[in-house]
Amino acid sequence: MMQSGIPFQGRGVPPLRGNALPGVIMGLFLWLPISAWGDTDVNDEAFAALQAEAKKGFSEEVAPFVKNYCADCHGSKKRKAGLNFLAALKDPGQARYLKQWKLAAGNVKDHDMPPDDEEKLPTDEERRRFEAWIAKIKYLSPKDPGPFVLRRLTKVEYGNTLRDLYGVDPAVAEELPDEVFGSGYLNTLSPLQSELYLGIANAVVDQVLAPEGKAPTAVQQRLFGEPPGEGEDPREAAEKVARRLARDAYRRPPSAEEVAVLLDVFDLARENQLAYSEALRLLFKAVLVSPQFLFITPSETIDPEEEIVPLDGYQLASRLSYLLWSTVPDAELYELAENGRLQEAKVLEAQVKRLLMDPRSRALFDGFGAQWLGLGDLESKTFDEAKYPLMTAGMRAAMVEEARLFFEEIVRENESVVRFVDSDHTFLNGPLARLYGLDDAITGPEMRRVLLDDPNRGGILGMPAVLATTSFPNRTSPVKRGVWVLEQVLGEHVPPPPANVPPLEEQDQKEVAGLTLRERTELHVTNATCANCHKVLDPIGFGLENFDAIGRWREVDDGGGAIDASGELPSGERFASPRDLKAIIATREEALARNLTERLLAYALCRPLQGYDEIVVDQLMEAIAKDGYRMQTLVTEVVTSYPFTQRRVR
Amino acid sequence: MLKNALIDRRTCLKGAGVSLALPLLETMGWAEAIVGKDSRPPVRLGFMYMPHGVIMDQFWPASPESFLTSPPPALESLRPVLDRCLMMKGIAGVPISPFNGAPHALELSTWLTATLPDAPTRHRVNIAISADQIAANYIGGLTSLPSLELATMPQTHKENQEGLHEAYYSHCSFRSPTQTVPAEINPRSVLKRLFGQSESPGKSAEVDPLDRQMLDRVIGGARDLRKTLPQGDQHKLDEYLDSVRAVERRIAAIEYRQKEAALEKAGVPSSRRHASDSPPIEIKIPEGDKRSEYMQVMCDLNVLAFQTDTTRISTYIGSTPNGVSYPELGFSDQHHSQTHHNHEKEKVGKVAAITKFNIDQFAYMVKKMAGLREGDGTLLDHCIMMWGSGLEDGNKHTRENLPFIIAGEGGGSVNTGRFLTGVSGNQGDLLTTLLDCIGVPLDRPIGLATKQITEMKA
């Protein structure tokens, strides 16, 4: 049942519509001589060959298999579970069928489908070949950067943008609803949000501008300039202000029509007998509630004939800046966009490095890293207060801070992604050091870099933030930890347990009385339904059992039984301690890097990966592997990738 | 997928675009009130949610006859108002196949839609407009807030069942099939939203009169921008236009309220309010973090919003289907983990305690409403308040008999004081009937509805 798959982890937007054709994109390669795209012709040729092979395989092998074994129940007449494989066969590469095919491959491989009581059952060899062909389905996807629609600034991005443009406290945006992340920041807008935007615009204007009759503030002078002198036309002066305000807030030069709208607002204020500065106040407010501020909008009108176009420089600058900084592009990025140079490969690469080395790149952890590690809820997660009195707000904050500093160091020092798992140091303050048993040496509230002697520690597997996140309020959960390692670290997809199967802790108490947590957990493997997955994920969790629910080392579990942290993976690799497990996971650098790349790409594109993206990731992986899986290279590859720099408009 | 077109276009206050003009309001009931023709208080509809189902033998009354005299333990706190409550057994939830592995992702999101998410696009939100939002579309234009959405926890749950979008876990209100309506969790923000900067109950929020005209021009600009964009982007911008128009309408309604208040002040016997009506209740925002106090202030805000006719439609997600614990009850276990109790006594006891705790907060709210004079009765008489869960038995994820309690006669439309057994219908039928009771005409049933539950009507 385990499938390595694309994480559906981005921020959701509509799926592919229709069948976008490749092409129109050759111009792109003039400025993308990096990574796998370097030798374009060869790659396209190779891709075409693979595509032809996959097509042949589908018509010669997959189609007969489907017709023989699947179509009676999942065809045009019966569509059990809502699946019609005959329809999918007509255009198997379509993004919307991708998940269906992968599910089918998993079910056929695991003998879950066709059901055992069917008359015709495929041979093991047929099953193997079916699965092998489904793995090649990615080559049937047309070359496509994926859908890309106007993106609303998230709550954090919006607050940061107001801070960087107008010097206000980003807390001004506090009342906006929190974003729903995970498989989706919801790129929608409700009346409540619009109403709050208007309220926030009022608050920003009040904070930034001096009351009528008072001397203007410094920000006000920067934004509005000097008021028109005697005999000067206030409307002309207002037009200059409108242009400047819109250029900053819209992150691109405004069109003539856009300036006209703002002047219209200025006129409205003047008709209502407002003074010049008060009229500018209303104009400023209009800028702040305009869609061009709240959404990242293109600066150029798209030719309706085009299907795929490169992002214009301003849009690319915003996309990059919001990805790595969660805020508006700075002057240098803006200038490069203005000069049309940002799309040059060397320039774009250099900008990625510059942005990553800037302190604002902590946004990459806050927005992406914390989400990847699953730390978003740690602050509010319930812990049994009597059992874990150490889990104070301060302790939780220190845990997340440790993860942040650790993540940021790997990014800044451009280290291999393996360092996430295998490291000899971490960041601690006094309270956090208690969990490590290092509180004699480390005291005080400030975080510092600490070399670790204990090889069980160092890396995310032995990090309290992660260990606490993957525990229950009152005990550890080997299952949750196993799932976490497989999904978050190695990028596997662990299917949810079947419906109506009570989790471990809900087993009949009489049956399990007297068993250790490990022994109880091992009951999973005695049940055929459960065993499929649990034989893989439970051992990983057992390997971390020496860490309690808040990440302290322990030799005995809650019931007083000795911890047995030994286990074996399906690959045959054996371990006896967290340190051994860490060493095994650290050898999976390719899986680790691919997982991070997929997650970062989905995050950067604000959508789940699909179809052609898999080909893109294959190509990025070649370049990333060549450079030893270094983190900055990984980020650079994502930013310079085909789907990040192009958009489908039709 | 059901669309906004569900309701009678005549009063669906959109389309014309620019803004809601005052004359439209004046043709819709209020004006009559001003000239003194009809001063019957409006009917309001509120929903309150608890996930994971109930302990059945502690929730369902033993028999129709014993309902009023010896109610089940879970309902104890409702005893003083039971004669104004209605319970019905036999309303089935939405069957969740093909999402069998996602009972909790769907219990809340199907609750007011009676519809399953669209399977092929499950990784994003695509379900149906919810009953509360259909009602808000119809009668929301009459109040300064079309509807009020409250929740106890942030709606940011991160778990992926059957590949369904995370938002399904924590949202019950959908403005359109693809747009969730976020709920507010901060009582201070709610108070401010209801009554403006002054936070003084009973007063309308203050608005800058030029804001509406400014928004009007911004909308005009957005329309120009829209024309230059590819189709996908145009849809996105439509959401913007729609939501900003809603703000314009809200400002218009507030202005109308202000005008009305001014008339009243000048001695014109205007509003729907009677001299004998209770004064607006006071809101005290608690200092600590006790769940009961927090939920009660949210309930108070709901009561106040209805009492002042600031809105007529509300939802309160008292708890969401994720790792919620109730330390106030003396245990740290998460709600969900206890609901799979396998009839083990201790866990059953904990689930019963959590259920009772949630119903107690609902009882707090409806009893408060029952104590407020309005017109010739009480506020509760003019409301339909429904408490419920999207599962019946959390242990087995069953949903054949959804547990819910209706309180209030809805202006004489609901026949209360009864426990009806052997009712046959589904969640969609129930929602369709509720909307009918508050006077929202539907041109088609909600979700999987096929009929109305006529037994519940007066």
Image: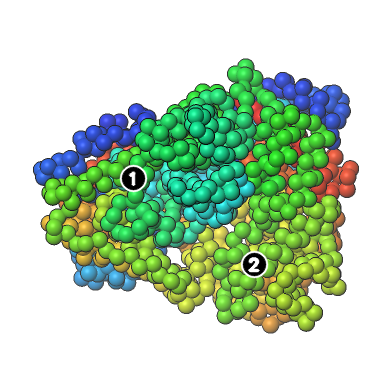
Q: Quadrant of residue B301?
A: bottom left
Q: How crowded is mark 1: few (under 14 residues within 10 Å), some or many (20 or more)?
A: many
Quadrant of the snapshot with the N terminus of chain B: top left
Residue A246 visible (yes or no): no
The residue labelled by disc 1 is: B146
Q: Residue B9 at x, y = what percent?
A: 30, 31
In this rendering, is residue A465 above or below A43?
A: below
A92 left or right, relative to B86: right
Q: Residue B259 at x, y = what percent?
A: 24, 44
A559 left or right, relative to A263: right
Residue A450 visible (yes or no): yes
Q: In which quarter of the image is residue B21?
A: top left
A442 left or right, relative to A290: right
- Residue pictured at 64% horizontal, 64% vertical: A469
- Residue pictured at 64% horizontal, 20% vertical: A306
Determine the residue located farthest toward the front in the rendered image: A230
Q: In the image shown, does A404 or A540 lie closer to the viewer? A: A404
- Residue pictured at 66% horizontal, 79% vertical: A558
The residue labelled by disc 2 is: A397
**Callout 2, which amino acid?**
Ala
